Amino acid sequence: MLVGLCKSGNLKGLESLQERSIVDLSSRPIYKYMAAASEGGFVDILDWWVGAVSTVESTRHDRKRNGRPCHPNEGLQAAAMAGHWHVFQWWRTYEPQDMLHMELRFLTMCRHGHVDLLSRASLCFRIYLDDDFPEYMDEASAAGHVEVLDWIMTHSESPGYTHKAMDEASRNGHLHVLDWWAQSGLPLKFTSSAKVDAVRAGKTDIVNWYNSFPLYRTLLCSSLLPDSPAPSAIRTADLVMLASFGALPWIRAAIGDDILSVSHVVDTSAFYRAIARSGHVHIMDKYNSDLRDNEDVEPCLQLAAQYDHIQVWRYLIDEMYTDHDYDPDFSDLWKSCVHVAAEHGSLDILEVLMINIKTRPLASDFLSVVAAACKGGSIKALQFLIDNKYWTAGSLSQHDMQAALRAAAAHGRIEVLQWWYSKSQQQVSAFLVFSRD
């Protein structure tokens, strides 16, 4: 309650509590209440605490009074986060000798984008930003504050920063920050984690930025940029990113020509899945020595089917048949690939599977193909089946049609329901009646 009163500037509420002795103010750790007032920007509350509680005083580590220290650290930090210059001035008057070490407060201002506060504080406290403290630019970049980066460039003769600036900006999805660095004229510093973390976070625009940035390809296919930290040992994340990008020369420079040489320290299965997902068959062909039959090939086949990478898919099929001196039964694998291709609208692979009598699903399994397309909202897969006379919208039984439409409805595929209605109005009307019943 006291924290809320202080943060909101409710002076009357505090006075009322004191007058009625509802709360014994002298028995409480007042630093958190003064920090709350600092965050809210209410210096009148700070003045009230100084007058109301006799134990409010600056306290060193070797001097405390009644176990209730009041040190400027918390208040200054709160003011830096909120951007209240007048609160800084209050603390400067209250405890001037504790304002000498302001680097951490400046770091907080950079993190929260308070350019005006930076300007005032730098003039008042004579703080100079240089390469001895690179965290300023790193934090501003990670938080997306290009106005702070501009301020540092203006006020620093030699701005310091590390690879964390672009790596963290990429992870957090700050595309405008990457554009700022590209136009800054400063040497770019980033690692493979920049794109890997963007992929993991689903930051598609960041991934596209790196893919379209010529210098990134130069980085990956030749050598690291100056001052960028070179990893002492290859990591799974590095291989996954390089495989996704298709950077075969850099992979060869990192691990040589044999994937088995690093299979004890990296997850080669993740490496193969990245290749299949990205469709780089030339890398798959180069590093297939650790491609284990069922453990790696089947997941990679399904990923290639999902993303419609027909060349990788055909390559993996050839690898599977090469390992067998007999005609194996892959019916379950074909079925799963058909389902994945139908769900994701991978028409190249779906066509290959449907043409071949060995890979085409049985008539009894065909409903599951339609249901998979409905589940994924893949109208183009449904239309493909109709155009190639594998199926007509009105050919399913009432029960099968209801099952397919339920798959679409369960996944919010309204467009499939509308498409189906246009193809077979009578059957959909019956389904709606059945659903109400």
Image (spheres, rainbow, N blue to C red):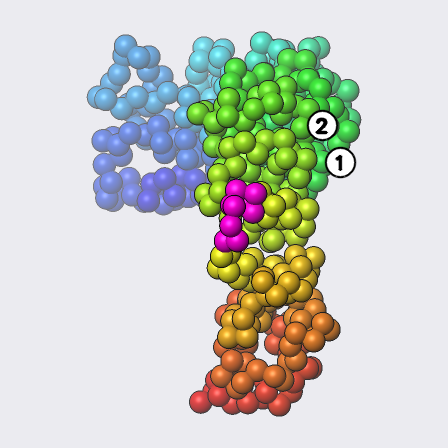
Image location of residue 161, percent across then percent down: 62, 18
Between 50 and 262, the one nearer to me in the picture: 262
Do we see residue 39 in this rendering?
yes
| Residue at image point 60% right, 27% down | 192
Image location of residue 142, percent across then percent down: 59, 30
Between 267 and 205, the one nearer to me in the picture: 267
- Find the residue positioned furthest to the front: 325
What amino acid is labelled 1 in the image?
Ser
| Image quarter of the N terminus | top left
Q: Report, in whole angstroms, how far the alpha carbon at label 1 lies from the one at label 2.
A: 8 Å
SS for callout 2: helix
SS for callout 1: loop
Do we see residue 116 in this rendering?
no
Q: In this view, does 105 lie above or below 327?
A: above
Q: Give the range drawn in magenta.
A: 320-328
> Would you name the residue on which mark 2 appears?
216
> Would you name the residue on which mark 1 appears?
212
What amino acid is labelled 2 in the image?
Tyr
Residue 126 is drawn in which quadrant? top right
Q: Does the magenta stretch include residue 136?
A: no
| Image quarter of the C terminus | bottom left
| Residue at image point 49% right, 11% down | 100
